[in-house]
Image: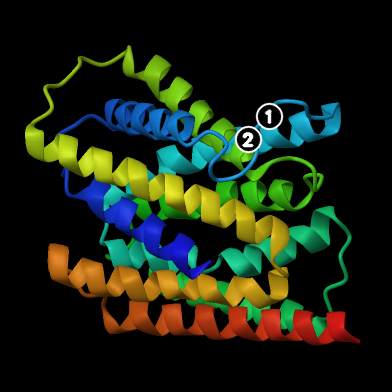
Amino acid sequence: MMGSMAAFTLNDTMTKTTGGEVPLFQLLFLRGLISISLLLILWGRLGPMHLRLSRRDWKLVGIRSASEVGASYFFVTALFNMPLANLSAILQSLPLTVTLGAALFYREAVGWKRMSAILVGFMGVMLIVKPGTEGFNIWSVYALVAVLFVTVRDLSTRRLSGDVPSMTVTLAAVLSVTVFSGVAQLATPWAPVSGTHWTAIAAAAVFVLMGYYFSVQTMRIGEISFIAPFRYTGLIWALILGWFVFGDWPLPSTLAGAGIVAATGLFTLYRERKLSRR
């Protein structure tokens, strides 16, 4: 999970360095083509990859892939328009939203202590987003929508059968984003890509592929209550890279909100682990 968070944050950093000079859908399309090429080159080396899935698993893979498309669009749009650390801080609410989603849709038991922690955690998110203030903008809403899509993605991943190869799930995610971006890109003029931007896009493709693969592996094989806290290492990466690469540092209120979200998320996961041991 720590490898996944590092890879995703490095992908975000490489993507953000293009500065929006490459149109969004064109960027996602080019990144996807490189990722698919790498997947085909690595076919069989990182684990089995086949398409012999049950109808139920195909449905879950479809839901997961559609969620990946939505998450990519809203997340990358927000990434171009807000500091990396602020966006990462909002994403730290994922363990809370996944726990709440599992309770609502999978009927998993969530006691009053964890539910209280989730509510407090969402208050921390409000500190980061700052609704009703000068610091609030539409890009914060985009980040929240991205969290919603990633929550659906992770919940569907947890329901996949054990015999569905992780590489197949990874390929489906990358392919869905690439195809959608390729079609959407037809509505906008094709922009020239400089050598610097090609390097950034290629590096982003490598990192996003690593992030997808590590994330699928951990969500399917690792014990959720143990691995989920390591998501918060992504915030550390975002703070460091945001400062060194872009010169951004969050406001104290944003850091306070991120601290509340992380603390309540860790408490929620601690309670889940304690109850599962019983």
What's the colour scheme? Answer: rainbow
Residue count near mark 2 (Cα–Cα under 10 Å), binned few <14, some 14–19, many ≥20: many
Relative horizontal placement of residue 32, taking residue 204 as reference (left or right): right
Tell me where residue 189 appears, x and y as whole percent.
Answer: 20, 14
Q: Residue at x 30, y 28 (%)?
A: 30
Asked whether disc 2 touches disc 1, contact meaning CB atoms under 8 Å apart, the reply is: yes
Question: Is residue 129 something one can see in this rendering?
Answer: no
Tell me where residue 81 appears, x and y as whole percent.
Answer: 25, 50
Q: Amino acid at mark 1?
A: His
As measured in the structure, the alpha-carbon distance from the residue carrying label 2 to the one carrying label 1 is: 6 Å
Q: Residue at x 22, y 67 (%)?
A: 242
Circle 1 residue: 50
In the rendered image, which quarter contains the C terminus?
bottom right
Across the whole image, how many numbered discs are drawn on residues?
Answer: 2
Is 276 placed above or below 52 here?
Answer: below
Q: Amino acid at mark 2?
A: Thr
Q: Earlier in the sequence, mark 2 or mark 1?
A: 1
Tell me where residue 157 appears, x and y as whole percent.
Answer: 70, 48
Q: Nearer the viewer, mark 2 or mark 1?
A: 1
Where residue 247 sits, quadrant-wise, is: bottom left
Residue count near mark 1 (Cα–Cα under 10 Å), binned few <14, some 14–19, many ≥20: few
